[in-house]
């Protein structure tokens, strides 16, 4: 039976959640296909949970995720190859599509704490694709794609170094006589530490190590290394491998450690698309060295989409729960309202929904931009390629940093918006938050990535002073006009964010110059200007996110059904106004905006909350998360929150006996003074 409040919400909404769901899924066919695929898995008893996953031990969780992961991949592959037909070869688009099935809603529905085979596709296969020569791809790619004797992962980070990649200590020495590389872990800090699936799952890795040919250091290169025997799965001689242990979240990923002692691999297992070692030991750098970092760029790009889903999963749970939960009369003597009617509750939840929708539009744009840059890189026009890569790096770094930070913060706001019940593991905010906050750190830590973007921004700012043509993402730096507060509030807000960004970049540049004038070197000056540089990259990200959201929505809006267009326009506006208000410190620092104008924004913000209120439940229904994807007692479609909370408590293994054995062994002796 459906909760009556949710029934009422759905009946009185002015948008059709099905229309929204079709747009969200990329069309009716896509939506139907996704639902049919999900039902094949979610209705299959072999994918049911007997015991709540949160009640399993760490080891049991791993074993469960491998058992389920292999069944999942087997079934999914069959479905995917039928769908792809003859096109079932591994290229960038196919990989992205498949990876999305693993880590998007379907994968999340089956693995709330992720699973260890994910890295094989997102990082191992993508590295072969990006960094392997054609010959290497012929040898390895199809096998890897079909997991034919190969389960891979990406081993870059070490115990001692993660952010500063050039500091990695793993060594690969070329032995010309045997045409082999010899891999070594010279000390404890050189142990690989963190790679997902490395602990007990993977049998091959892409390893990043410092290449030496004789005495000559040839920089970091990537190597394909077998670490476990294909048949027995025992570690190869000289390989020391294991799992690093429980973490704050993502506890089924099987993150591992790895050390090498004189492990030999053939010469053709260095990935040689951009750099080669000839058989007689000549090192040739034939491509742009930075392409070695290509896998990281790829994952940063797709992470924006991953955290968008996590934020909206949490948003769906909090919205439905807030429509079911009744508490605290607004007027004395009146019935307790749905907590969603408290304006402050709307102000916690709706901006997160708006942010998620904005990330969706920006993630689509970013993926397109990534593909365009990849095509440019193939054209071998080195100047153009290097400019495009620099822009892609800068944009993807700040978007990944800010999106993961805001999504994690948003998920925690949504968790708190569910009061005490939000803290239950069965509400599922812990898993969702655990994954989102991991993304804040992995694939480039937040501050470290913002500093990368800031370098690019300062350079573009200096170019703007020289009146040079600027890349698309920063053309606004050419516009030095002051803010003219007009009728269009959205435009006022976006423009003031752009001005704040421009001025903050200018300030960061001035700080660097001041330090240089004091006689400090470039690096020390950058370090001392660090706070301003991070503020500049953050301000740029906000300006870019708002401008891109507005532009992308306007580009597509005419092709949408009026009710979908209407709610998306409200959400876009809410996102822009919310960003402006949250960044008010920066905005007011760099723009002349008076109290009346600020109040105008606040009033419109509050008005938008009221406008969205009647459609909130229909909107989150439109994201079309299956109950299994939400995995939450608070967020299920039928709204039977209290029944589910109680049923889940009763399923808890502790409640399977009326008296636990610890009573006889400890409590009773304590009470009888017999300890
Ligand atoms: C079921 C559903 C579940 C979903 C969720 C599941 C979660 C669990 C599983 C998730 C899987 C996670 C997988 C994670 C994997 C990893 O984390 S892999 C390791 C990633 N590591 C990093 O990202 C390290 C970050 N550090 C760096 O990238 C770099 O070291 C640096 C910070 C960028 C600095 O590099 P350095 O070599 O020191 O170079 P610099 O001297 O600073 O820069 C030189 C110039 O190069 C430019 N540059 C740097 N990187 C790139 C690049 N990638 N592309 C292009 N250009 C680059 C840099 O800007 C410099 O340019 P100039 O300013 O012009 O000199
Ligand atoms: C869940 C998870 C999964 C992961 N999966 C993988 C994987 O599959 N493969 C893999 O190779 N790695 C993986 N990693 C490792 C991950 O990429 C690194 O942890 C990440 O890049 C951060 O590096 P670090 O741990 O060295 O942090 P640190 O760099 O030590 O960061 C600590 C602090 O130092 C600051 N700091 C560091 N450098 C600078 C600087 N230049 N300027 C200013 N401040 C600085 C940071 O801002 C931060 O506040 C994973 C990590 C996690 C958490």
Image (cartoon, helix red, strand yellow):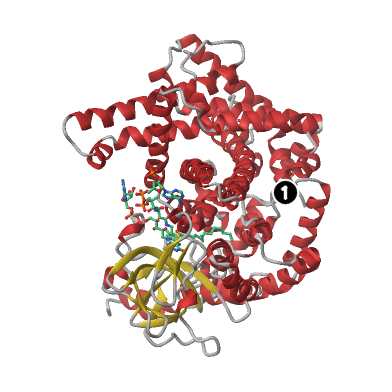
Answer with left or right where residue 177 lies relative to residue 189: right
Residue at label 1? 624
Q: Position of residue 249 (x, y in %)?
A: 47, 60
Q: Secondary structure at mark 1?
A: loop
- The one of 484 and 73 positioned closer to us in this rendering: 484
Taking the image in four quarters, ligand 2 sits in the one at bottom left
| Whether residue 161 can be seen here | yes
Q: Is residue 108 above or below residue 3?
A: below
| Whether residue 14 can be seen here | no
Answer with left or right where residue 448 lies relative to residue 600: left
Tell me the quarter of the image containing the C terminus.
bottom left
Q: Position of residue 497 (x, y in %)?
A: 48, 24
Count the marks: 1
Q: Quadrant of residue 218?
A: bottom left
Measuring 48% from the left and 22% from the top, which residue is drawn there? 478
Q: Quadrant of residue 500?
A: top left
Q: Is residue 564 above or below residue 645?
A: above
- The one of 407 and 201 positioned closer to us in this rendering: 201
């Amino acid at each position: 039976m459906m909760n009556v409040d949710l029934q009422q919400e759905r009946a009185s909404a002015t948008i059709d959640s099905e229309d929204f769901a079709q747009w969200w899924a990329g069309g009716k066919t896509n939506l139907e296909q996704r639902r049919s695929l999900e039902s094949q898995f979610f209705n299959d008893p072999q994918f049911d949970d007997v015991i709540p996953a949160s009640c399993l031990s760490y080891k049991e969780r791993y074993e469960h995720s491998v058992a389920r992961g292999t069944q999942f991949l087997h079934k999914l592959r069959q479905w995917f190859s039928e769908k792809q037909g003859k096109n079932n070869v591994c290229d960038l688009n196919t990989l992205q599509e498949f990876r999305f099935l693993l880590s998007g809603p379907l994968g999340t529905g089956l693995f709330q704490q992720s699973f260890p085979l994910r890295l094989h596709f997102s990082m191992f296969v993508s590295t072969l694709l990006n960094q392997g020569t054609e010959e290497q791809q012929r040898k390895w790619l199809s096998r890897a794609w079909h997991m034919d004797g190969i389960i891979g992962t990406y081993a870059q980070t070490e115990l001692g170094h993660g952010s500063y990649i050039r500091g990695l200590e793993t060594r690969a020495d070329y032995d010309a006589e045997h045409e082999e590389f010899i891999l070594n872990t010279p000390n404890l800090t050189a142990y690989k530490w963190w790679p997902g699936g490395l602990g007990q799952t993977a049998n091959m890795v892409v390893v990043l190590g410092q290449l030496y040919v004789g005495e000559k250091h040839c920089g970091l290169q990537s190597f394909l290394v077998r670490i476990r025997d294909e048949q027995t799965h025992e570690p190869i001689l000289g390989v020391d491998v294991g799992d690093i242990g429980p973490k704050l979240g993502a506890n089924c990923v099987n993150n591992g450690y790895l050390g090498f002692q004189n492990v030999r691999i053939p010469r053709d297992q260095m990935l040689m698309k951009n750099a080669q070692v000839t058989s007689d030991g000549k090192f040739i750098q034939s491509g742009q060295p930075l392409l070695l970092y290509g896998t990281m760029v790829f994952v940063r790009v797709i992470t924006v989409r991953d955290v968008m889903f996590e934020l909206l999963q949490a948003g769906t749970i909090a919205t439905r729960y807030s429509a079911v939960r009744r508490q605290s009369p607004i007027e004395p003597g009146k019935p307790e309202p749905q907590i969603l009617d408290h304006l402050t509750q709307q102000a916690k939840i709706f901006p997160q929904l708006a942010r998620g929708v904005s990330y969706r539009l920006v993630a689509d744009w970013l993926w397109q931009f990534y593909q365009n840059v990849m095509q440019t890189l193939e054209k071998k026009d080195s100047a153009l390629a290097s400019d495009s890569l620099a822009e892609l790096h800068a944009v993807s770094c700040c978007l990944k940093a800010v999106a993961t930070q805001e999504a994690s913060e948003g998920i925690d706001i949504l968790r708190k918006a569910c009061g005490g019940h939000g803290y239950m593991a069965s509400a599922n905010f812990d898993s969702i938050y655990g994954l989102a906050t991991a993304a804040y750190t992995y694939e480039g830590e937040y501050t470290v990535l913002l500093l990368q973007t800031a370098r690019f921004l300062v350079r573009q700012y200096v170019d703007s002073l020289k009146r040079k043509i600027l890349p698309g993402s920063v053309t606004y730096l050419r516009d030095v006009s002051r803010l003219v507060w007009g009728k269009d509030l959205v435009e006022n807000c976006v423009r003031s964010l752009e001005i704040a960004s421009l001025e903050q970049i200018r300030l960061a540049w001035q700080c660097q110059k001041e330090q240089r004038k004091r006689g400090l070197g470039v690096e020390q000056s950058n370090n001392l200007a660090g706070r301003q540089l991070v503020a500049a990259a953050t301000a740029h990200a906000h300006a870019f996110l708002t401008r891109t959201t507005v532009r992308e929505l306007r580009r597509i809006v005419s092709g949408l059904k009026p009710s979908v267009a209407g709610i998306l326009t409200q959400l876009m506006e809410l996102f822009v106004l919310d960003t402006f208000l949250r960044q008010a410190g920066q905005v007011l620092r760099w723009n002349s905006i008076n109290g009346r104008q600020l109040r105008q924004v606040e009033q419109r913000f509050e008005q938008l909350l009221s406008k969205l209120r009647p459609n909130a439940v229909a909107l989150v229904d439109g994201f079309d998360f299956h109950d299994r994807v939400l995995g939450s007692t608070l967020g299920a479609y039928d709204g039977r929150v209290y029944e589910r909370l109680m049923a889940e408590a009763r399923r808890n293994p502790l409640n399977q006996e009326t008296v636990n054995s610890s009573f006889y062994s400890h409590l009773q002796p304590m009470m009888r003074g017999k300890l």
